[in-house]
Image (spheres, helix red, strand yellow):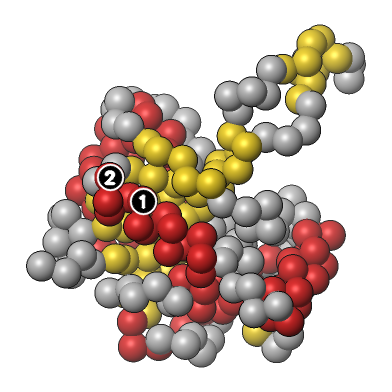
Amino acid sequence: MRTKLWAVVPAAGSGSRFSKTELKQYQFIENQTVLQHTVNRLHTLDLAGCVLAIGEQDTFAKTLSFQRQDKMHFCLGGSERVHSVLNALIYLSDIADEDDWVLVHDAARPCVTSICLQELVRSAIETDTNSILAIPVRDTLKQVQTKNQIEKSVNREFLWQAQTPQMTKLKDLQYAIEVALANQVIITDEASALEYINQPVHVVQGRSDNIKITYKDDLELARLILKSQAENSNI
């Protein structure tokens, strides 16, 4: 039986660090929104479908044109990212098999390359293990607690910076999130929910250009990365 892949994109957040009034996923880069770039990159994989979890007042997302419009699904997002992901998984449970694979990807990560996506999928399926894209921490890290005073340097030898997509099976991720939320555990990404229930998670080395647009200046950086990738056919 062919392995089915589904994508989940939580896109209901307000992104207050980017702007109090503008949504980062709907900023334009080369005549397309950030969200369109993001979703279209995911569609370089052979997806069974892509679920966007959007805000209750969002009337814009469904007007956008995506490369695989026939595979787009929409559901109501939640108050936090984790709730949006869970809502999308519950939506998927009605149309997907519980053993299908799900890739959860940030709406504001438009620069992930198809090569990284393919490597993540290959690794997860071949090892039958939850997997995420991540990169080793490069910079010296400082622990700062009070009055901007450095307390100590942190050994970065075993530290990785998590990215998305993060890939696991539908039933496992839904269970992990539900258990974590029931126990009021703070969930910052899908891997943290899986870690909480002691499920193994492998890292697959990604690329530093898979940035997440968080602040205003990140938008210009994403614009430059996408331009460079297009010019070098490096997507």
Task: Name the residue that disc number 2 marks.
Answer: 127
Q: Are marks 1 and 2 in contact (CB under 8 Å)?
A: yes
Percent position (x, y) of residue 67? 47, 87
Q: Residues within 10 Å of mark 2 (few under 14, many from 20)?
A: few
Residue 194 lies, with reference to residue 154, above or below; the image says below
Q: Is residue 228 left or right of residue 52?
A: right
Badge 1 element: helix
225 or 92, nearer to the observer: 225
- Type of amino acid under label 2: Thr
Residue 229 visible in the displayed image: yes
Residue ID at (51%, 69%): 114
Percent position (x, y) of residue 95? 18, 69
Residue 226, quarter of the rendered image: bottom right
Badge 2 element: helix
Percent position (x, y) of residue 219? 77, 66
| Label number found at residue 123 | 1
- Type of amino acid under label 1: Ser
In space, the residues marked 1 and 2 are separated at their CA atoms by 6 Å
Residue 63 visible in the displayed image: no
Q: Quadrant of the N terminus?
A: bottom left
Residue ID at (81%, 10%): 151
